[in-house]
Amino acid sequence: MAADKRHAHELIDRLAPSQVPAVVGILEALLDPVSRAIANASIDDEPVTKAEEKALAESREWLKHNQGIPHEQILAELGITQEEIDNYRDPK
């Protein structure tokens, strides 16, 4: 394991500065349990129901005539912040 970590460090040291943020993002995703769970989740292959199709069509039609609601506004209405979401840990 130590040799693998050393090798990883050597590879990171050889990256162009513009490549470092991409690698940091990958490493953070690997260490984040939610990202890992999403990446390992099975593909949802259940067919879309008639009710779901109808709801999607209604939503798309609504958005043609109305402005979407910003994420920040929804969070404010719920009384939470993005930081709280980002830092949430399941209390299992």
Image (tube, grey):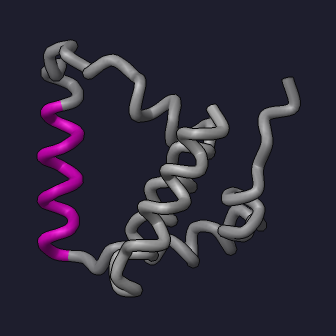
Question: Residue furthest toward the right?
Answer: 91
| Residue under the image location 34 percent in, 82 percent down | 16
| Left or right of 13, for residue 15 | left
Q: Is residue 90 above or below residue 30?
A: above
Tell me where residue 67 appears, x and y as whole percent.
29, 80
| Residue under the image location 40 percent in, 22 percent down | 41
Question: Residue furthest toward the bottom?
Answer: 17
State which quarter of the image contains the N terminus: top right
Tell me where residue 36 appears, x and y as whole percent.
51, 35
Q: Is residue 41 above or below residue 53?
A: above
Which range is magenta?
Answer: 53-65
Tell me where residue 81 appears, x and y as whole percent.
72, 70
| Left or right of 15, for residue 91 | right
Tell me where residue 5 appears, x and y as whole percent.
59, 46
State which quarter of the image contains the C terminus: top right
Q: Is residue 86 above or below residue 1?
A: below
Q: Main secondary structure of the magenta part?
A: helix
Q: How many marks?
A: 0
Q: Considering depth in this image, is 88 or 71 the residue closer to the camera? A: 88
Residue 30 in magenta stretch: no
Q: Is residue 70 above or below residue 24?
A: below
Residue 60 in magenta stretch: yes
Whether residue 60 appears in this view of the structure is: yes
